Image (cartoon, rainbow, N blue to C red):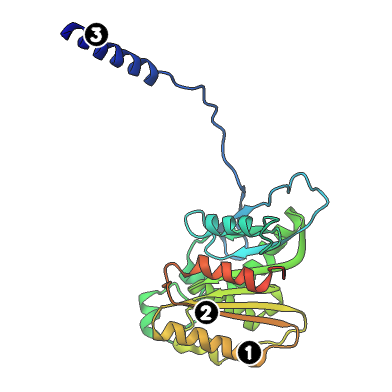
Amino acid sequence: MKNQLLFSFLFTLMFCGSKAQEVPNVIKEPLSIGETLTFTSSVLGEERQLNVYLPNGYAENKDKEYPVIYLLDGSMDEDFIHIAGLVQFGSFSWIEMVPESIVVGIANVNRNRDYTYPSTDKEYVNKYPETGHSEAFIQFVEEEVQPLVENTFRVTDEKTLIGQSLGGLVATEILFKKPDLFTNYIIVSPSLWYDYESLLKMKPVSYKGEKKIFIAVGKEGEVMERVANELYEKLQKEKGKKTTLGFKFLPEQDHGDALHLAVYHAFETLFAKKK
């Protein structure tokens, strides 16, 4: 009996061992969702990168043009992957929350430098001496990024800008100073406290065309929530007849995780087809 049990045990070990050694023939291939464009910016005097998501079927549908979503904080280790995924999901034919779009993530080099205008706050400037060069960054977007994208890919005239935090600050600055650079603006948790909230005191430049604007903020404290609300109220007073304006407070989100859900709500509000 003992010999029979021992034989059964050894047979089981041999069987399991032989099964464990059976490795399937696996073919590995790179997984790609688009392209990375690297170039030297003459405006900024440095190398910059754009991460580009191309919709499914872009290569096959050679006559089709696509709107472009420009994403600030668009590095691979920042917001590019999850926003590109949200655009892909939202553009499925059974969802139709956002049209099939190209996503261009503008990778960061120095966001505190690029996303802030000159400040009179000496304490902040002493802490971040590189601050205050958003004018050059906006010029870079206008004169280099947009033309490069438009000359490289098949695009329509519709351009959306997404910015959060300091990215939301510079997105608001663009909306106020050069509104026609983009058709639509998604501004999340904007750092409008910057420079004693001076941007909120500025009168925005007027525009004539259609504009879609969405503002969102999470449970981020009195100042962040107040300035986001004040931005919405200011735009509500200034908006023209062709402006769609939306606002969303996200009580379950904070500054760190508000972006994804905010952009989802923005797509629903600004682009989703009515069913």
Q: Position of residue 221 (x, y in %)?
A: 39, 82
Tell me the CA gap for discs 1 and 3.
Answer: 83 Å
Residue labelled with disc 3: 7
Label 1 or label 3, whichever comes before in sequence order: 3
Q: Residues within 10 Å of mark 2 (few under 14, many from 20)?
A: many
Tell me the CA gap for discs 2 and 1.
Answer: 24 Å
| Residue at image location 63% in from the left, 55% down from the top | 88
Is 271 or 220 nearer to us in this picture?
271
| Residue at image location 51% in from the left, 53% down from the top | 76
Between circles 2 and 1, the one closer to the viewer is 1
| Residue at image location 52% in from the left, 67% down from the top | 261
Tell me the CA gap for discs 3 and 2.
Answer: 80 Å
Residue labelled with disc 2: 117
Mark 1 in CB contact with mark 3 (< 8 angstroms)? no
Label 3 or label 2, whichever comes before in sequence order: 3
Q: Position of residue 159 (x, y in %)?
A: 70, 68
- Quarter that holds the C terminus: bottom right
Dividing the picture into quadrants, the one containing residue 160 is bottom right
140 lies left or right of 20: right
Q: Position of residue 254 (x, y in %)?
A: 41, 73
Callout 1 amino acid: Gln
- Quarter that holds the N terminus: top left
Is 232 or 176 nearer to us in this picture?
232
User: Is 268 above or below relative to 117?
Assistant: above
Residue labelled with disc 1: 236
Label 2 or label 1, whichever comes before in sequence order: 2
Callout 3 amino acid: Phe
Dividing the picture into quadrants, the one containing residue 200 is bottom right
Query: Looking at this rendering, what residue extends furthest in the front direction?
Result: 1
